[in-house]
């Protein structure tokens, strides 16, 4: 990882963008986890329920993202015929 | 009242034996809802701590702050576009002519038409919901946009583009909107407790 960052001359965190343009879709994972944790921490009555509920909703968000992506690709292919 | 079971029924006996429904084992705080809302904005999660729900407050606060910092890390601090400042970190001035004297003077655009300026950089609105941390990051962004004293043709910090910029912006905005949700929920819980 450090070699990868050094290859792109990434030496100033926060002052230059991370060289992750080829892996941008992986950045959706922490965002989904964050949204799921905050949402379930607000929604659940007991905090002990939060980890399992947040894991479940994270998987649902990712599955729905993937399904929406596949549907849109299909739609674009049909429309561009 | 016809739907209520008789007082000596098994259901009412079970209800009397069940522990009361509480959100936390800590004693209810008397913090007022507006105070809880302001505390939640100043420090994400602090509103829950004020009403005695420390675990919930820590979980929400840490998650929101981590999302915000991740956004800054991914796209660089200059991902925050601050209304009233251009890409070089310079205050945008608008020349205006005084009709009586004819003199032309410059005014900061935020003093003349702030809504137009905010409308051209709308992401700042959800980003600022994260609290003073976002105001600090906005100031940092303006500072890093200014020319580097050692190399005046370049700014101190680099600007991100395309998807990296979009994703960084998304992280910051989502952090702010999640904090808005937490502010509303914590204030609602505080109001419910005050009314109980």
Image (cartoon, coloured by chain):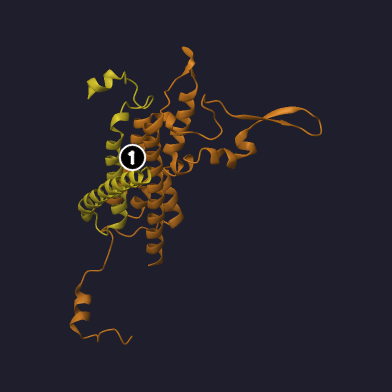
List x then y, in percent, for residue A31: 31, 42
Chain B drawing hue? orange
Q: In the image as oriented, which residue stretches furthest toward the front? A: A81
- The quarter of the image holding the C terminus of chain B is bottom left
Is residue B179 shown above or below B75? Answer: below
Q: How many marks?
A: 1
Q: Quadrant of residue B13?
A: bottom left
Q: Residue at x 48, y 39 (%)?
A: B124
Instruction: Please tell me which residue lies in front, B17 or A52.
Output: A52
- Of B12 and A39, the residue lying toward us: A39
Left or right of B146, for residue B187: left
Q: Pick the residue in front: B56 or A17.
A: A17
Q: Which residue is mark 1?
A: B67
Chain drawn yellow, letter?
A: A
The structure residue drawn at horizontal position 29% and vertical position 29%, both measured from the top left corner, is: A22
Label 1: element kind:
helix
Whether residue B194 is situated above or below residue B177 in the rendered picture: below
Q: Is residue B149 visible?
A: no
Q: Position of residue B57 (x, y in %)?
A: 32, 49
Between residue A49 and residue B30, name the one nearer to us: A49
Give how far across and how far down residue A9 sits, in percent. 31, 18
Residue extending farthest top: B150
Label 1 crowding class (10 Å Cα cut-off): few <14, some 14-19, many 20+? many
Q: Is residue B51 above or below residue B22?
A: above
Chain on which label 1 sits: B
Hey, which quadrant is residue A10 in on the image? top left
Measuring from the top left, give residue A27's x and y in whole percent. Answer: 29, 37
Q: Examine the rendering and report whether any part of residue B94 can be seen.
A: yes
Q: Is the N terminus of chain B in the top left, top right, bottom left or bottom right quadrant? A: bottom left
């Amino acid at each position: 990882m450090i070699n990868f960052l050094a290859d792109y001359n990434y030496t100033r965190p926060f002052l230059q963008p991370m060289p992750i343009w080829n892996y941008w879709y992986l950045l959706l994972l922490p965002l989904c986890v964050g949204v799921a944790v905050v949402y379930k921490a607000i929604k659940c009555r007991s905090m002990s329920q939060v980890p399992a509920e947040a894991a479940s909703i994270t998987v649902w968000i990712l599955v729905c993202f993937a399904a929406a992506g596949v549907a849109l690709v299909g739609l674009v292919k049909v429309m561009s015929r | 009242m016809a739907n209520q079971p008789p007082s000596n029924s098994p259901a009412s006996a079970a209800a009397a034996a069940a522990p009361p429904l509480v959100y936390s084992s800590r004693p209810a705080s008397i913090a007022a809802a507006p105070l809880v809302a302001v505390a939640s904005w100043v420090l994400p999660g602090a509103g829950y701590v004020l009403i005695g729900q420390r675990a919930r407050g820590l979980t929400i606060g840490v998650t929101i702050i981590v999302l915000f910092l991740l956004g800054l890390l991914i796209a660089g601090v200059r991902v925050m576009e601050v209304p009233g400042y251009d890409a070089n970190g310079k205050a945008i001035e608008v020349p205006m002519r005084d009709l009586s004297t004819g003199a032309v003077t410059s005014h900061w655009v935020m003093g003349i038409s702030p809504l137009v300026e905010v409308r051209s950089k709308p992401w700042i609105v959800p980003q600022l919901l994260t609290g003073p941390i976002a105001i600090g990051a906005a100031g940092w962004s303006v500072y890093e946009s200014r020319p580097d004293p050692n190399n005046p043709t370049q700014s101190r910090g680099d600007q991100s583009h395309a998807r990296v910029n979009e994703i960084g912006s998304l992280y910051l905005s989502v952090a702010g909107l999640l904090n808005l949700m937490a502010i509303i929920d914590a204030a609602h819980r505080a109001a419910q407790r005050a009314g109980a």
